[in-house]
């Protein structure tokens, strides 16, 4: 019996000891309170880098601070900008997934892939499915094994390509995703410690994400076709199969896709001169801020169209019930964001964010690292943290309040810092044994090769991780060195 605990039992012991993200933020909040008391007693403070004013450390146990933290608790939570963005985007994406549209769209596209373009097309589909949450994990990964096997290729090669693209390209995409909304929202809140007027939009990483997507697809294609599949054929031979696959409702998929495109074009039309999404000075700032609304309307309407045409939605009650189910799954995120928002408020009220950022920037300045190397250093930090805790949002919420302002003072913009963090976090996902993606991947592979072990999976995935990490460092260096915009408004 190939039980995972018999392969590398220490991995499971390590994973079991990693605290829940909520617990981590509670502990960080306690540490912040203690630090504020100590820093205030020592008279810590710095001169603000932009105003020159003296910023002293504040004791969070002082009566006026306690009064603020307790009286304004609801306002602190509801005023946390990533909260609304996360609720809207994830609810809409979950609705489109539960309606069956995302799964049918992926399956329909996969059927029309030419054999010569199978790996890059599968990699592209895997990257695009990030917008639907775990739809790529749940639908495309098993489907890829069947498609490869039906095409006379090794099924595990297809699964490996999807897994490498989903994990290694977690922040790579050609469209804006809910992850953009959450991570950039956190970065924007952190940046306001240095620049109160900071206004990152959810498209601030789109250009580098698109480039990263091309890089990931190229790497996954080369490694899968030239390295992984030949080794699999030698070590784990597998016979082709012609197992039939259910066909999605073609008309419903087309109608829902047309709906998505129509909504997107409608929003773009409102950017034309005189349109409601163009600023008074002709800028596109209103359009950037409307991207969340576009995603929400696009996914909900396309899901409704698909559900009605397939018979899943027979009345308005079915639509509302599905929306409720999607929102219900956000319970953990709401709880997490409450503790994140309160932790950030503690940091802000204590002035520790500004103090640590200025002092950290002074320390880094001694090394005289140019901005490109600052980006590379952040990629390496994110990669190391990913091995300890796979959750990208939770880690960024923990380190962004200190990292973003500190790097801003050294010349690295918040959009660039966020992009560097995302690249580093993505690459190591592929070989993180604590990742839920890896556990599910092993389960899917064992449908085709029951003897396949976790150590075998890690061995197969290492070339992807190393290649994507190195390519990501080159990419962030190029963007920063040549001052290439990371995305809209950056």
Image (cartoon, rainbow, N blue to C red):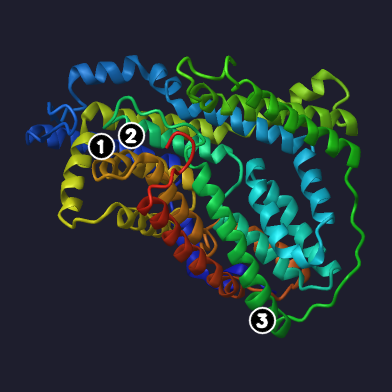
- Label placed on residue 231: 3
Label 1: state its secondary structure. helix
Which residue lies under the disc numbered 1? 32
Residue 259 position by quadrant: top right
Tell me where residue 257 appears, x and y as whole percent. Answer: 78, 36
Q: Which residue is drawn at 79% across and 27% down?
A: 304
Q: Is 211 drawn above or below residue 164 in the view shown?
A: above
Q: Can residue 248 be seen in this view?
A: yes
Q: Using a 10 Å C-alpha cutoff, classify the residue at mark 2 as few (fewer than 14 neighbours), some (14 to 19) or many (20 or more).
A: many
Residue where numbered disc 2 is placed: 191
Per the model, the C-alpha gap separating discs 3 and 2 is 47 Å
Distance (Cα) linking label 3 and label 1: 51 Å
Horizontal and vertical percent position of residue 419: 44, 47
**Residue 310: image location, x then y, percent:** 89, 34
Q: Can residue 385 be seen in this view?
A: no
Viewer-side residue, 126 vs 15: 126
Nearest to N terminus: mark 3 or mark 2:
2
Considering only order in the chain, which callout, 1 or 3, is on the residue closer to the N terminus?
A: 1
Q: Quadrant of the N terminus?
A: bottom right
Location of residue 162 by image quarter: bottom right
Residue 26, percent from left and from top: 36, 37
Mark 2 and mark 1 lie on one chain; the one further toward the N terminus is 1
Q: Residue at x 47, y 14 (%)?
A: 280
Distance between the alpha carbons at the discs numbered 2 and 1: 19 Å
Q: Is residue 349 above or below residue 418?
A: above
């Amino acid at each position: 019996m190939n039980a995972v605990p018999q392969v590398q039992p220490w991995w499971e012991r390590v994973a079991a000891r990693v605290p829940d993200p909520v617990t981590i933020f509670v502990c960080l909040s306690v540490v912040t309170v203690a630090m504020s008391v100590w820093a205030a007693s020592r008279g810590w403070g710095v001169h603000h880098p932009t105003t020159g004013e003296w910023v002293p450390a504040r004791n969070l146990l002082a009566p006026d601070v306690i009064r603020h933290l307790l009286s304004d608790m609801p306002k602190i939570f509801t005023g946390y900008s990533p909260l609304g963005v996360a609720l809207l985007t994830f609810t809409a994406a979950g609705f489109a997934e539960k309606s069956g549209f995302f799964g049918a769209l992926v399956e329909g596209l996969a059927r029309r892939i030419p054999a010569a373009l199978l790996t890059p097309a599968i990699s592209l589909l895997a990257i695009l499915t990030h917008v639907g949450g775990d739809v790529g994990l749940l639908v495309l990964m098993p489907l890829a094994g069947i498609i490869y096997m039906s095409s006379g290729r090794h099924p595990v090669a297809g699964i490996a390509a999807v897994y490498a693209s989903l994990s290694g390209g977690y922040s790579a995409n050609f469209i804006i995703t809910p992850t953009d909304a959450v991570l950039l929202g956190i970065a924007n809140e952190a940046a306001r410690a240095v620049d109160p007027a900071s206004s990152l939009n959810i498209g601030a990483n789109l250009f580098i994400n698109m480039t990263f997507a091309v890089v990931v697809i190229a790497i996954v294609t080369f490694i899968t076709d030239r390295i992984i599949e030949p080794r699999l054929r030698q070590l784990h031979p597998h016979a082709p199969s012609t197992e039939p696959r259910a066909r999605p409702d073609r008309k419903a998929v087309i109608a829902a896709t047309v709906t998505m495109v129509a909504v997107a074009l409608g929003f773009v039309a409102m950017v034309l001169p005189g349109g409601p999404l163009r600023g008074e000075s002709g800028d596109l700032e209103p359009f950037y801020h409307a991207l969340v609304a576009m995603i929400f309307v696009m996914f909900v309407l396309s899901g409704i169209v698909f559900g009605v045409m397939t018979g899943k939605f027979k009345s308005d009650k079915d639509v509302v019930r599905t929306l409720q189910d999607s929102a219900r799954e956000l319970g953990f995120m709401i709880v997490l964001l409450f503790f994140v928002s309160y932790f950030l408020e503690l940091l802000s009220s204590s002035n520790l964010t500004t103090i640590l950022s200025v002092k950290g920037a002074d320390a880094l300045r001694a090394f005289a690292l140019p901005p490109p190397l600052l980006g590379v250093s952040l990629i390496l930090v994110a990669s190391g943290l990913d091995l300890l805790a796979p959750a990208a949002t939770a880690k960024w919420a923990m380190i962004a309040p200190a990292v973003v302002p500190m790097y801003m003072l050294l010349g690295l913009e918040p959009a660039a810092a966020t992009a560097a963090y995302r690249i580093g976090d993505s690459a190591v996902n592929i070989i993180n044994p604590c990742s839920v993606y890896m556990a599910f991947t092993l389960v899917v592979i064992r449908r085709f090769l029951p003897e396949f072990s976790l150590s075998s999976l890690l061995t197969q995935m290492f070339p992807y991780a190393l290649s994507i990490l190195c390519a990501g460092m080159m990419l962030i260096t190029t963007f920063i060195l040549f001052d290439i915009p990371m995305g809209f408004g950056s």
